[in-house]
Amino acid sequence: MIVACILLGACTANVDDTRVNADGKPNNIMTGSDANPAPGSIANAGNPNPALADFIPVGYTDELQPMVQQLCTGSCHTGAPAPGPVTLNTAETLKAAATQAAAAITSGKMPPNAADKSEADKKLLAQLAISLTNWGRNEAYANALSDFTITWTPAVSGLANALCISCHKGDQPPAGLRLETQDQWKTAMPRILQAVENRKMPPKVDEVQGPRLLRYLRAWQDQGFP
């Protein structure tokens, strides 16, 4: 299992490219400068929450494969003669082309009709470029989100601080929902999952980041809230 050290809200921090902790083990802390594209590129299209874009860990089967199937392999990049020729229809072929594909999306070269895509697809393309970068750089080409060990500290507590605690704290929190401690999150998880799934909360989490956040919280729940 890969320990998911997700420090939300640290998008401007400087982290060495080696991403090695004091104990010599690789971490999976990403910074905005690592993965975020230049202003004006397609991969910067209207993402209201770059913290989620950068910091939720990336797996192939539950994140990359569905995005690639929707955006890249419907009529292209799926066997010979693929454009380039670059095939992207398996984990191995995507791994080999991940850096190239992320750069092509970020620069607006791919897909060829990027400018004509819907706003929803542009946001999905933005996330695909970031996820491809993160997947290969410090997430060891994980197969699925379940490959990560998701813990309250620092991962989920960082998420709570970035997205929830500014409102859901104190004696009179919205909807009577305090989210300051691990136990409060465990107790409230059915309500939290419903709110995320219905896109009611957190604010500014869009149609791309909402499902990613939902998968992440469900994975933490499935692991028993460590």
Image: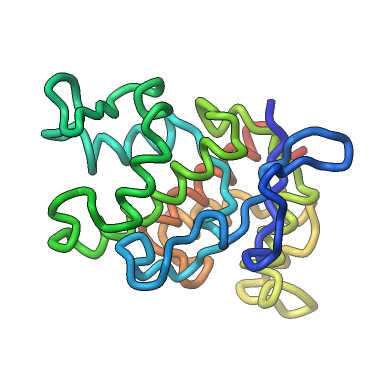
Residue 50: horizontal and vertical position, in percent?
A: 51, 64
Point 26% across, 57% down: residue: 108
In-front residue for pair 203/116 = 116
Q: Is residue 73 visible?
A: yes
> In the displayed structure, does residue 64 sit left or right of residue 175?
left
In-front residue for pair 193/93 = 93
Q: How is the image coloured?
A: rainbow
Question: The N terminus is located in which quarter?
Answer: top right
Q: Establish if 30 lies above or below 84.
A: below
Q: Locate residue 91: give its quadrant.
A: top left
In-front residue for pair 42/96 = 96
Q: Is residue 187 visible?
A: no
Q: Locate residue 117: give its quadrant.
A: bottom left
User: Which residue ends up furthest to the bottom in the rendered image?
Assistant: 172
Point 62% across, 64% down: residue: 11
User: Which residue ends up furthest to the right in the rendered image?
Assistant: 23
Residue 180: horizontal and vertical position, in percent?
A: 77, 64
How many labels were placed on the picture?
0
Point 45% across, 51% down: residue: 130
Question: The C terminus is located in which quarter?
Answer: top right
Residue 197: horizontal and vertical position, in percent?
A: 44, 53
In-front residue for pair 83/149 = 83
> In the displayed structure, does residue 189 sit left or right of residue 5?
left
Q: Locate residue 206: give its quadrant.
A: bottom left
Point 67% across, 71% down: residue: 176
